[in-house]
Image (tube, rainbow, N blue to C red):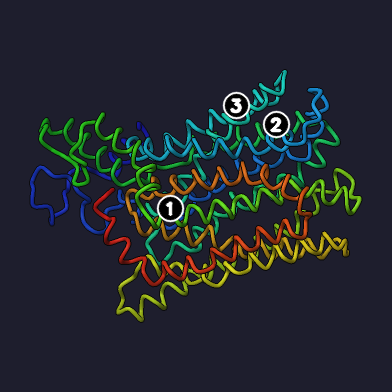
Amino acid sequence: MAGLEEDISALGTASVDKKTKNPNEINWAGENDQLNPRNWPVGKKWLNLSVISVMTLSTPLASSMFAPGAPQAMREFHSDNSNLETFVVSIFVLGFAFGPLLVAPLSEIYGRRPIYVLSNLLFCIFTMACALSKSLGMLIAFRFLAGCAGSTPVTLGGATIGDTFPKDKRGAAMALWGMGPLLGPIIGPIIGGYLSQAKGWRWVFWLQLIASGATFVLGLLLLKESYSVVILEGKAELMRKETGNQDLVSALHHGLTRKSHFTHAIVRPTKMLLLSPIVMLLSIYTAFLFGYLYLFITTFPRVFTGKYHFSVNSSGLAYIGLGVGCFFGLIMAGKGSDVVYKKLEEKNGGEGKSEFRLPLLVISAPLVAIAFFWYGWSVEAKVHWIIPILGSALFGMGMMPGFICINMYLVHSFGVHSASAIAASKVLQSIGGALLPLVAEPMYDRLGLGWGNSVLAFIALAFVPVPWILFRYGGLLRARERARF
């Protein structure tokens, strides 16, 4: 909070927006107030986002880096349970489901910066505990807690972009931030495969600790508060101290006591998930996408070492196709989303709508289903290993625009409560990432990789109409539910 007070003091607090009718209401000092994150210099915006993007890469990286070393840990702890081995990897993602329910409300009360910094510190502590684990139970428990703490940048990144970037320029920013949660789980096994074979599974966690320690220092030194509500509250508080006028209040003040505000904020993500058809539909869709991603992550080592006879360290290279597909999907979403948004905005008389972020999702959604048919039957037929890897690349191209477009849609639709909307979606998303791999294992055993992946492809096909329906009718749904939150 001290850093925020310094920024407010440096920029000045005396002037009040002339449009404010109440003389005791503190607002921005005009349209160009540099205290407003939307008016920050471009370099400051991108520096802040770059730090958050590095944080967002380090925690999802940790979610999968341990996967190639999991068999070593199971042998050390004298267990040969394959489901438990999968669970040790995916329990981290289950932590991603619980963390956002606390992280998002706290960020809407205390601001983004303190939550980023504190969560990063906790992540370092829990990661160290994983490296020092003396039993399988201890490892599972601290993997879960690390996932809870590591969920912060994944939960708040999209909301921070909404804080600082205008609506028609969020595509590139969201693409930079989106590289972490989607490329991290893919790069992780490549690093983990070589590191665990060379140094053992514990060194995977020591490397994570070094990386997260570096991001903690970056966040402590460079991160700035971006949440307008908290910034204006800080400005009002400072002016009350300077003037002695205790009637001064922020223009964005919610009118609630801190206890009532916390109660409302802590309930809001669950309320959104249960009462908003938009949040519910998109959360279910991202849950399957994320589950499919972790299905690849957890099954690739067995598929490529068992069927294609890759070594443990080279099995990590099977993820390169998935990474390349995500990279091209990222370019498509980052470059194309803003272009499409601006064109539709011009056609609509200069008025932008949240639904203008969905057309790329309409195009990319069918790729997910095609990818699973391709991947499943090519592995079943034991064709050359490059063919299933190309199938996974196609999945990456379909998945990436899905996550980017959905996050932008939620940020655009829910404004100051966008962190809660994204947190609600992360709950189901993370549960899907943690549990779908566990369900898929017995399904593959019974149906084989061909028909097993076909079942997943048919589910993906069922979701293809969802973005089109929201594009046509999302505005009506948003108008009905706006007052609820």
Q: Nearer the viewer, mark 2 or mark 1?
A: 1
Give the distance between the C-alpha atoms of the residues marked 2 and 1, in whole angstroms.
35 Å
Residue drawn at x 80%, y 42% is: 193
Question: Left or right: 203 with respect to 397?
Answer: right
For disc 1, the neighbor class at 10 Å (few under 14, some 14 to 19, many from 20) is some
Residue 211 in picture, x, y percent from top left: 64, 37
Residue at image coords 27%, 59%: 480
Using the image, tell me which numbered label, if any, was put on residue 225: none
- Using the image, tell me which numbered label, if any, was put on residue 126: 3
- Which badge, 3 or 1, comes first in the chain's sequence? 3
Q: CA distance from mark 3 to mark 1?
A: 31 Å
Q: Residue at x 44, y 61 (%)?
A: 170
Disc 2 to disc 3, how far (Cα)?
10 Å
| 455 lies above or below 131 | below
Kind of element beneath mark 2 = helix
Q: Nearer the viewer, mark 3 or mark 1?
A: 1
**Three-letter code, disc 2:** Phe
Earlier along the polypeptide chain: callout 2 or callout 3? Answer: 3
What SS does tag 3 mark?
helix
Q: List the residue tagged with mark 1.
A: 280
Counting residues from the start of the chain, the first of labels 2 and 1 encountered is 2
Query: Residue placed farthest to the front in the image?
Result: 446
The three-letter amino acid code for the residue at tag 1 is Met
Residue 46 screen position, x and y as percent: 48, 54
- Quadrant housing residue 210: top right
Side of 449 where 218 appears, left or right: left
Which amino acid lies under the numbered mark 3 shown in the image of this protein? Phe
Residue 205's mark?
A: 2
* Residue 312, above or below 380: above
Which residue is at the front of the view, 482 or 328? 482
Q: How many marks?
A: 3
